[in-house]
Image: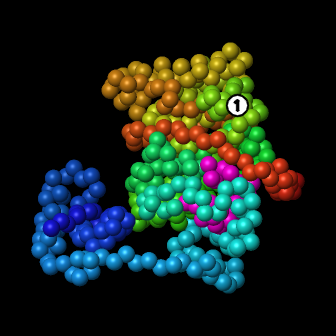
Amino acid sequence: PVVLLANRGFVTDAHSAASGKGMPGVRVVGTTIACESTVEADIESGIDGALNDIIAALTKPLTQEEKSPQVKTEKAPRIAFKGTYQDVNQFFYRKGWGDGLPIVPPTEAAVAEMMTGTDLPANHMVAKLIPRGGKATVEKIAVNAVMAGALPTHMPLILAAVDALADPATRFDTFEVSTGSWAPFFLINGPIRNEIHINSSSGALSPGNIANSAIGRAVGLIVKNIGGARKGIEDMGTLGNPGKYSLVLGENEEESPWDPYHVGKGYKKEDNTLTVFFPNRYTMTVPPETNAEGLAKSLARMRPGALSALIVIPDHAKIFKSESWTKQQVKDFVIKQSSSPTAGGIMGSNARRGRGLQNEDFMLVVAGGPGVWQGLLQSAGGFKNSFVTRKINLPKNWDKLVAKYKNLVPNYVRY
């Protein structure tokens, strides 16, 4: 006899996990003990309060359903719902298929148009996604991309993103369902940034551009609807993370004096790539000095550690260049500043353990517009994970697709 103990807030998550492993009848007892509690009296009280339920769960005879659990399978209809735009949105929301914002109805015509963004067949499986092991086929990916408001020109990036998430080095298996509320961050490099209007300049991490917003949103819907990571059921983020709506950034290669990120990873400048890692912290700061050393000191004080992306605006990158600082020299300076055992935060703890900040721990990216701010996206929590880069594969009809959607850009009225 076995009974699983869980904090009361995680009982539904425990049942979902057990069912996903083919054990829907596993008995779970919820306790009042706070997660990771260190208060002995609370732990003892919680166990005492659950003891009768534990004994009952261990001794009560199994029901017929528990003895022979039956997997419920229903063939999904091709057409999920018919109705008005409002009716469709309310139906999808009640089903738990949305993300709290209105969706674009994934009609047959819209999904077919989305799939013109790839040469892969509809039934091609790009990856299996946790926690349910859902099969992310091209067509299912296209359905969620339509719902997110993406364009067919975004499809190659979304496919690359799903493939990248399946790489164990991302630790997606932990981060997407963890209480730590990590969010996937996608860095886009190559000519495709301009072809599909990915924002790399002012407000690049803010809402406003279809590509930046819809690509990230599509991945979030895919993770939920195909992977099965539902908020408060499998995705147990304690506080949540607004970055889960979308966290997509293009490197501002045109205004950078250095080689872009993907060239440093061995790709050609004309290659299109997508790089992913999972931060759960975003901060900005203003450097007190704007000479090269002052900028570098400010970057170091932001305390990049674990896995991080330091975002340098073009104006600051040009200052570094004017004083003959290479990207590697900036990184070396930040690493040296972090090597002191007296350094605080994650950097200091790394140093005290005999491991200072390493080159592979953080990327230096040039992005953003005019101003003075520096940015840091950080994966805090001490997990061993890596940046994962995928080359973006374009369909044969790429030039025609780009031409079809190239004029879909905002035209703001002058006040």
Q: Nearer the viewer, residue 148 or 25?
A: 25
Range drawn in magenta = 136-160
Residue with the mark numbered 1: 268
Q: How is the image coloured?
A: rainbow
User: Callout 1: 10 Å neighbours few (<14), some, many (20+)?
Assistant: few
In the figure, 249 relative to 341: above or below?
below
Q: Residue at x 22, y 63 (%)?
A: 5
At label 1, the amino acid type is Lys
Q: Is residue 337 visible?
A: yes
Residue 233 at x, y percent in the picture: 41, 66
Please tell me whether residue 240 belongs to the stretch shown in magenta: no
Q: Main secondary structure of the magenta part?
A: helix
122 left or right, relative to 5: right
Label 1 SS: loop
Please tell me whether residue 153 belongs to the stretch shown in magenta: yes
In the figure, 378 relative to 166: above or below?
above
Q: Residue at x 85, y 57 (%)?
A: 404
